[in-house]
Image (cartoon, coloured by chain):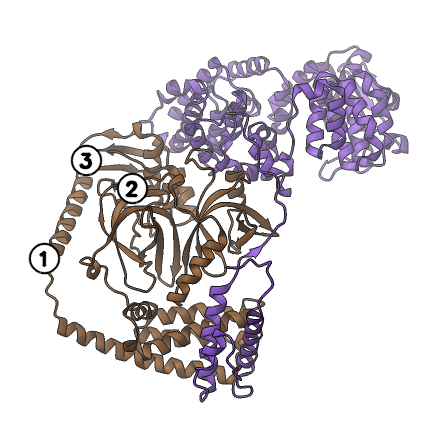
């Protein structure tokens, strides 16, 4: 079974640092009672604290890295899964090529069945009851409309009375209206409100930051009121900002863009009970960014099929909007392969990148994050913080919590390098860093 | 887009003022201070003028939406022209193999951390360096664990030293490596000595002491009066390398140094010389206090010193007993003085072998600890193997673990193994918790011979087959340490023959497995360097 994952990529799958550490601890053959492999999967039995060993199995054939472990851990992937992968990466010879035991073959068979069913469902012409759907949409929009009306009143009252006393307000001040927006089926607005909650206590300049957010919210409310009068792309942006998402399945029949897509990097964030993974791609020929989102509620797994610093040929369908960013994979033509950073179409200066960001904002004012791919930047220290600097001495600050400054310096040696990051208008959150022009062990 | 250095246009200044007005109005509330829109003049104000002015809140929010977006989109990156350190020059050492770096990653992630020094040494031995991506973790490890530092320095490569120079937390690694050419050329040597940073100078001194101790001493003397106290003490400490009577005048002068640490270091070094004025002064102080009574059995009569005078303090005697030392003040002074005198002096003066002196000192319980501690320290300072063995022999019987651990590693590995074999012959019950050999094994720092390894493994197999009691707990916990002492090429035979069917196996299995796992890891790890 070809196995292309590197230790770093495997550790990047770990849900947290302690899992990664525990996984490393299990990456020795003595921890395992059995280790097996066939042309599709790897598996192993690991002696845990219980009497029965934990059974770990990983399906490598389908490209989306499915796994299962019999341990009770809620962390996914668990340390046993990580340990088995790490062991496969470092000591492949320890795995005996054999026919899988029942507990593995049963699982693989079940997976094949599910995949078949799913494919069959796709192939079936979907019987869409357009009338019922239109009714549902109308009902939801009415609900949103009522919710937004209420929110507008709340916002106007706030502006009328003044914002000065907001730093003393409890969190519920923001979370109560956010909850009402969830009830009104506008989760995007709820999130905007929750994001505001921390701003009044975020130090100097909070007034400006908050007023700017209020402006964005106001624009959304006003936009929704006159939705029908706006261009289709802007309508889509407003729906997206409200949280009215299009189902991925509904996009499948739309034409896509076939290209070599470079996987720039990945960010995983926890929102309430939901884990959101943002994977940023860049089209090598189309020269456009794309964002793939993967969501995992409690105990679900994120999509691990695209790992940073890889490249694949695929067709992506973009969600509609004035600046289409979010996309879905419609078809894959090649499995992911390691990316060659010299081929990355990076921008030469920071001001060129912020220029592109400004153009995107002008078309869609609700954009929250935009990917930057910059050439020839160095990492510099500004007090306790870190920043990227280009050849024109322009800088973009990394977020205050950014920890890897020394690591970046160690890998670049102070030489200009390629950097991919996520720009939110304030901070550049690094996604990937390519020191040197070659993707070599340095 | 314009650069930040260009002056803001009249329009941007006006828009900044306008945003301030918006903020003021929003903060106090439109009820008290409604927003007054400016007359149209710029494209922005022209748009603002289109807002419906009848509802002040809506007007303000509309203006905030427009101006906020304008500000966000028009934000320019901040310039920073602060010079950065020069980029790092290319490496000169080759990097270790990818598999070797996987092993490093594992150890830095806390797996088999105890093997890290051995790995670092192996990398240094083949002249390689660590990959750049592990420098941060390695430098951090050295920051937390000072014992790792000497192992880390040779494998950092240029990148590592370049990096360490930028982070004060890693200053221990902030040394320029000094080539033999430099130490051979007096002009270059003086230049590095005068301009190098603290760590570099200390390393330089260490290197020169190994080859030409006198030259190193002269180097220290050239700048001595201008050095800080802690630099002076760490420089003097390097005299331990290549120490000789030629160093005595310098060290004797250092006994009058302003810094206590310098005085203490100098006094300690003077006691390590074959003879020194300090040793003679100590002898003349102690001689009147001790009397050999050639009775049957012989004894030593002790008179305690009356006072600790300034001359004694100058010679390195601490006036106040260390806490928990168990000594009274006067006994503490005498013990320290005894520790400064070569123990062989007493054997010669009283014309008796060390064993007899120790027996005589042991008769009187009141003075026993005083003599044993004084002579142990003295034997350590002199590296007097006859005395070390004599002291150890008594300590083995009593299993005084701390002293076994201090003294045993001072002996040559072959001698240590001979003593261990002796102990094994004397008590043939396999490796129980009270077996002296066990504690000797724990104290030894050398790699075991193949003979010893096989013997110990056989002993452990017997022990695990026959017993498994809570008293064996101490034995069990030592197995991981033993795995660090066994030659890794014996991994394969070490795995065989364990009594897995024994009823006691459950008691031992985890720790035996752990031991074999460490041995296996060392085996794989070192194989990476054997090509």
Tell me how far mark 2 sits from mark 3, CA to CA.
Answer: 26 Å
Q: Is the residue marked by circle 2 packed among few (<14), some (14-19), or many (20+) residues within 10 Å?
A: many
Up-down: is B223 above or below B136? Answer: above
Residue B415 occupies quadrant: top right
The chain in purple? B
Chain letter, disc 3 residue: A
Q: Secondary structure at mark 1?
A: loop
Foreground disc of the pair 2, 3: 2
Name the subunit of mark 2. A
Q: Nearer the viewer, residue A93 or B15?
A: B15
Which numbered disc, 2 or 3, marks the residue that appears first in the sequence? 3
Judging depth in this view, the residue of A36 and B276 nearest the camera is A36
**Drawn side of residue B26 relative to residue A87, left or right:** right
In front here: A262 or A152? A262
First reached walking from the N terminus: tag 3 or tag 1: 3
The percent position of residue A9, horizontal first and vertical second, equals 37, 41
Q: Are marks 3 and 1 on the same chain?
A: yes
Q: Name the one closer to the observer, B505 or A367.
A: A367
Q: Colour of chain A?
A: brown
The residue wearing badge 1 is A124
* Figure quadrant of the N terminus of chain A: top left
Which is nearer the N-term, disc 1 or disc 2? 1
- The answer to whether residue B457 of the structure is visible from this angle is yes
Q: Which residue is mark 3?
A: A100
Measuring from the top left, give residue B294's x and y in whole percent: 81, 14
Q: Residues within 10 Å of mark 3 (few under 14, many from 20)?
A: some
Instruction: Tell me the quarter of the picture where residue A129 sits.
Output: bottom left
Residue under label 2, please give it.
A336
Q: Chain of mark 1?
A: A
Mark 2 lies on a secondary structure that is: loop
């Amino acid at each position: 079974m070809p196995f292309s994952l590197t230790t770093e990529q495997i550790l990047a799958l770990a849900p947290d640092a302690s899992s990664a550490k525990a996984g490393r601890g299990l990456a020795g053959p003595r921890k395992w009672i059995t280790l097996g492999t066939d042309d599709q999967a790897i598996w192993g039995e690991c002696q845990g604290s219980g009497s029965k060993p934990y059974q770990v199995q990983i399906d490598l054939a389908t490209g989306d890295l499915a796994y299962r472990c019999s341990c009770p851990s809620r962390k996914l992937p668990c340390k046993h899964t990580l340990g088995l992968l790490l062991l496969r990466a470092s000591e492949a010879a320890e795995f005996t090529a054999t026919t899988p035991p029942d507990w593995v073959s049963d699982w693989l068979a079940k997976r094949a069945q599910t995949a078949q069913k799913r494919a069959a469902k796709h192939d079936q012409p979907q019987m869409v009851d357009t009338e019922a759907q239109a009714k549902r949409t109308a009902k939801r929009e009415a609900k949103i409309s009522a919710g937004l009306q209420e929110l507008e009143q709340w916002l106007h009252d706030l502006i009328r009375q003044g914002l000065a006393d907001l730093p003393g307000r409890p969190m519920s001040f923001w979370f109560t209206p956010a909850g009402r927006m969830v009830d009104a089926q506008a989760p995007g607005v709820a999130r905007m409100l929750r994001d505001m909650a921390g701003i009044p206590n975020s130090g100097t300049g909070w007034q400006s930051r908050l007023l700017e957010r209020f402006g964005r919210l106001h624009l959304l409310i006003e936009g929704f009121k006159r939705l029908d009068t706006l261009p289709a792309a802007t309508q889509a942006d407003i729906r997206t900002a409200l949280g009215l998402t299009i189902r991925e399945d509904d996009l499948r029949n739309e034409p896509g863009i076939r290209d070599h897509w470079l996987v720039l990097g990945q960010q995983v964030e926890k929102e309430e009970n939901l884990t959101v993974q943002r994977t940023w791609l860049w089209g090598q020929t189309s020269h456009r960014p794309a964002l793939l989102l993967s969501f995992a509620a409690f105990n679900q797994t994120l999509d691990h099929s695209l790992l940073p610093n890889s490249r694949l040929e695929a067709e992506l369908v973009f969600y509609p909007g004035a600046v289409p960013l979010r996309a879905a994979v419609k078809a894959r033509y090649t499995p992911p392969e390691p990316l060659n950073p010299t081929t990355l179409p990076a921008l030469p200066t920071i001001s060129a990148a912020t220029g592109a960001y400004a153009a995107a904002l002008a078309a869609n004012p609700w954009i929250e994050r935009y990917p930057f791919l910059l050439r020839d930047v160095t990492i510099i220290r500004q007090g306790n913080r870190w920043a990227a600097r280009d050849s024109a001495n322009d800088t973009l600050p990394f977020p205050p919590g950014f920890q890897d400054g020394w690591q970046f310096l160690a890998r670049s040696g102070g030489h200009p390098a390629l950097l991919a990051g996520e720009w939110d208008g304030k901070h550049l959150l690094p996604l990937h860093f390519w020191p040197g022009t070659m993707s070599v062990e340095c | 887009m314009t650069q930040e250095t260009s002056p803001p246009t009249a329009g941007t200044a006006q828009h900044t003022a306008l945003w301030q007005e918006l903020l003021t109005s929003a903060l106090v509330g439109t009820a008290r201070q409604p927003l007054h829109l400016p007359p149209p003049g710029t494209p922005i104000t022209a748009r603002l003028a289109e807002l419906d002015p009848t509802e002040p809140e809506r007007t303000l929010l509309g203006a905030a939406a427009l101006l906020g977006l304008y500000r966000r989109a028009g934000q320019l990156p901040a310039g920073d022209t602060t010079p950065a350190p020069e980029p790092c020059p290319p490496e000169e050492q080759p990097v270790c193999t990818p598999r070797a770096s996987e092993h490093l990653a594992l150890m830095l992630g806390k797996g088999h951390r105890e093997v890290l020094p051995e790995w670092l040494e192996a990398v240094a031995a083949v002249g390689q360096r660590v990959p750049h991506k592990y420098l941060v973790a390695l430098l951090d490890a050295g920051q937390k664990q000072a014992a790792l530092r000497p192992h880390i320095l040779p494998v950092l490569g240029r990148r590592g030293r370049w990096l360490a120079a930028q982070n004060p937390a890693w200053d221990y690694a902030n040394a320029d490596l000094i080539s033999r050419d430099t130490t051979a050329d007096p002009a270059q040597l003086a230049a590095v000595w005068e301009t190098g940073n603290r760590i570099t100078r200390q390393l330089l001194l260490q290197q020169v002491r190994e080859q030409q101790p006198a030259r190193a001493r002269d180097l220290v003397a050239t700048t001595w009066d201008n050095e800080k106290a802690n630099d002076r003490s760490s420089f003097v400490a390097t005299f331990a390398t290549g120490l000789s009577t030629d160093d005595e005048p310098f060290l004797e002068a250092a006994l009058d140094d302003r810094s206590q640490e310098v005085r203490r270091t100098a006094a300690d070094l003077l006691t390590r010389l074959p003879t020194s004025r300090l040793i003679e002064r100590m002898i003349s102080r102690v001689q009147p206090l001790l009397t050999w009574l050639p009775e049957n059995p012989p004894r030593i009569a002790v008179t305690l010193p009356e006072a600790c005078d300034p001359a004694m303090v100058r010679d390195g005697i601490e006036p106040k007993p260390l806490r928990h030392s168990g000594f009274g003040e006067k006994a503490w002074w005498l013990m320290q003085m005894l520790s400064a005198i070569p123990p062989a002096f007493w054997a010669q003066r009283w014309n008796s072998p060390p064993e007899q002196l120790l027996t005589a000192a042991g008769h009187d319980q009141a003075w026993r600890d005083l003599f044993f501690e004084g002579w142990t320290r003295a034997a350590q300072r002199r590296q007097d193997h006859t005395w070390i063995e004599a002291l150890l022999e008594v300590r083995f019987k009593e299993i005084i673990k701390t002293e076994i651990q201090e003294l045993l590693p001072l002996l040559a590995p072959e001698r240590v193994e001979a003593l261990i074999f002796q102990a094994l012959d004397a008590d043939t019950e396999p490796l129980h918790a009270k077996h002296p050999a066990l504690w000797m094994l724990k104290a030894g720092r050398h790699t075991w011979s193949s003979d010893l390894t096989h013997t110990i493994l056989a002993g452990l197999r017997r022990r695990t087959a026959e017993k498994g009691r809570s008293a064996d707990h101490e034995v069990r916990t030592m197995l991981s340490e033993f795995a660090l002492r066994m030659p890794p090429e014996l991994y394969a035979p070490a795995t065989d023959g364990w009594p897995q069917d024994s009823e006691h196996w459950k008691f031992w299995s985890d720790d035996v497995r752990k031991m074999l796992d460490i041995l296996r890891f060392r085996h794989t790890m070192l194989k990476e360097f054997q090509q």
